[in-house]
Image (cartoon, rainbow, N blue to C red):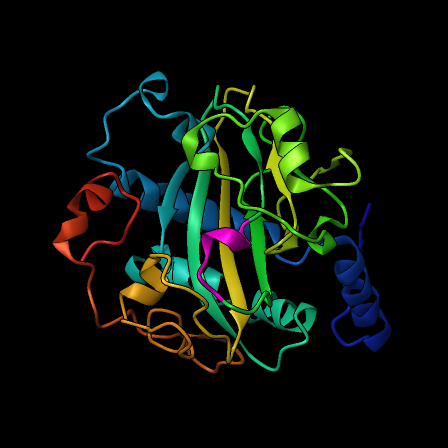
Amino acid sequence: MIFLEILNLSSLSMQEIFKKRFKEEGFVVIRDLLEPSEVEFYREVVKEATTERKQYDERSLKDKSEYEQSFTQCQNLWEDYEEIRRLTFDQRITKIASELLDANAVRLWHDQALIKEPGGRETDPHHDQPYWPIKETDTVTAWIPLCDVGEKNGQLGFYSGSHKTKDQKFINIFSGKIDENDFLETSKLESDKVSYQNLNIGDVSFHHGLTFHRAKPNNSNEERIVHTAIFFADGSTRGDDTFHFSVDRPNIKVGDKIDSDVTPLAYPIKELPDRPKNGISNDFIGYKMLGLLPKD
């Protein structure tokens, strides 16, 4: 289990410690990276943003798909809300992402809010990289809890070292609940032990794109509110023709460098990026109406 109780960014030895542990374990938790007052501010902003995004989705929890019962998902919030843009591109967070990947610079793949409603089911075990058509595997997700997260309200857990497992296969959590035995057989994990993390406001968890992870159900009476941002090493290329807005919206071809205003530079930067110039086609109006995608 990885806990870095104090992060001193000026200490090279501390940097090397969490880089080494991230490389070995596939995740690292940084305590007290953000101030509680900042997190409280961002919590209200994200709540307002997701409420606006989801205003046309009147379904109850039981009427949603099994995937949606795990969490409400709103992507690319940075485009619509400048306050959230400041969180997504916070240089304290993006600098760590860059260091963990041993990259001189990183870009944003996309950000998103993940809100697990009261009564929301568990998030099935999976890893993220297979969902993204990025050839290289230099990817990391910053998981930023905007409330305290523990055993009763959607606690996040990792399969330590699973990012190093060979012959990993795609685990499709969109299709419904994942059978545990099928998961272990498909993932080829050496251990089914999960390292669950208690996270308080101010903490930020980082996990590699190939690290298997999951989350417990929300058995509390309050929403579990989390903001995440996915970063990848600058210079990465599109690996295949799997559809994804981050590359298809700016028309990035297979083999080309992923470099557009849809995936702007996240570190190092001196000012916040502008929102992308290209909108999302109304062919995806259903996704927009459900709040998954940004408005035009």
In the picture provided, is 55 more to the left or to the right than 260? left
Quadrant in the picture for residue 150: top right
One can see residue 41 in this view: no
Residue at 76% x, 62% y: name it: 23
Quadrant in which the C terminus appears: bottom left
Nearer to us in this view, 88 or 215:
215
- Residue 87 percent coordinates (x, y): 48, 60
Query: What residue occupies the far right of the structure in this picture?
Result: 13
In the picture provided, is 51 more to the left or to the right than 278? right
Nearer to us in this view, 25 or 51:
25
Residue at 62% x, 57% y: name it: 34
Magenta stretch contains residue 148: no
Q: Is residue 240 above or below residue 270?
A: above
Which region is colored magenta?
128-134
Residue at 37% x, 75% y: name it: 273
One can see residue 275 in this view: yes
Quadrant in which the N terminus appears: top right
- Residue 236 percent coordinates (x, y): 50, 75
Nearer to us in this view, 216 or 179:
179
In the picture provided, is 255 more to the left or to the right than 31? left
- Residue 75 percent coordinates (x, y): 36, 51
Number of labels in the image equals: 0
Magenta stretch contains residue 130: yes
Quadrant in the picture for residue 181: top right
Quadrant in the picture for residue 183: top right
Query: What residue occupies the far left of the structure in this picture?
Result: 282
